[in-house]
Amino acid sequence: GVWGEGCVWETCVLPFTGQVNYVLRVNKEMEGVITGEEKRQRGKFEVKHLNQEDKDEGVWIAFYLTHPHRKRRSQMKTGGLRVTQRLLNRLRYSGVVINLEEWDTLDREQKKSMIRRKVLQFTDEKKLNDY
């Protein structure tokens, strides 16, 4: 991976959506921060809240995968992308959508580049909001 296994947490932030998220925490220098065991030990069906202290330690980015032509019905049952984004923000995560149709056309380096660009966008926003 781009930041290493210890910095990526595979979980369901919003279990009722049925979506698996890949959560990455980065600091202001865009360096991956290892996710502690206390976070990783949370229950499968538990909503993964972050507190203000967690948020102060960096940007928590929850990646979630969607396909523009598949699983549309299940997405609509949970409110769609806008609702998912709003709920992730409420829990103090920055949500990033990965379009699987586009993802499947990329080679390994292009995928890494896409992830870096999306993370950079959120770390830049965090720096601006801190000043």
Image (tube, helix red, strand yellow):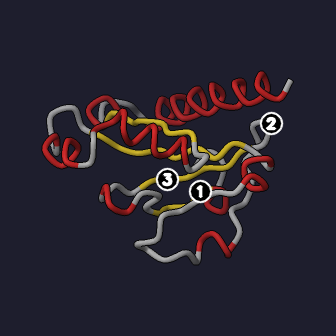
Q: Which of the marked residues, 3 or 2, is nearer the chain's N terminus? A: 3
Dots 3, 2 in contact, CB < 8 A? no
Task: Tell me the number on the disc at residue 8.
Answer: 1
Question: Mark 3: which amino acid?
Answer: Tyr
Does 64 sit left or right of 2 as displayed?
A: left
Does 39 sit left or right of 12 as displayed?
A: right
**Above/below status of 115 relative to 92:** above
Q: Which residue is mark 2?
A: 28
Where in the figure is residue 101, as x and y percent of width and height? 26, 32
Q: Which of the marked residues, 1 or 3, is nearer the chain's N terminus? A: 1
Q: Residues within 10 Å of mark 1 (few under 14, many from 20)?
A: many
- Corner quadrant of residue 105: top left
> Residue, x 68% and y 62% (percent of image)?
35
> Residue, x 61% and y 60% (percent of image)?
5
Along the line of sight, which residue is nearer the eye, 48 or 58? 48
Dots 1, 3 in contact, CB < 8 A? yes
> Residue, x 50% and y 39% (percent of image)?
95
Q: Residues within 10 Å of mark 2 (few under 14, many from 20)?
A: some
Q: Secondary structure at mark 1?
A: strand
- Corner quadrant of residue 31: top right
Question: Mark 2: which amino acid?
Answer: Lys
Q: Which of the marked residues, 2 or 1, is nearer the chain's N terminus? A: 1
- Between the C-alphas of marks 3 and 2, the distance is 19 Å
Where in the figure is residue 19, as x and y percent of width and height? 34, 55
> Residue, x 75% and y 37% (percent of image)?
30
Q: Which residue is mark 3?
A: 22
Question: Mark 1: which amino acid?
Answer: Val
**Above/below status of 79 relative to 41:** above
Q: Secondary structure at mark 3?
A: strand
Where in the figure is residue 51, as x and y percent of width and height? 69, 57
**Above/below status of 18 relative to 66:** below
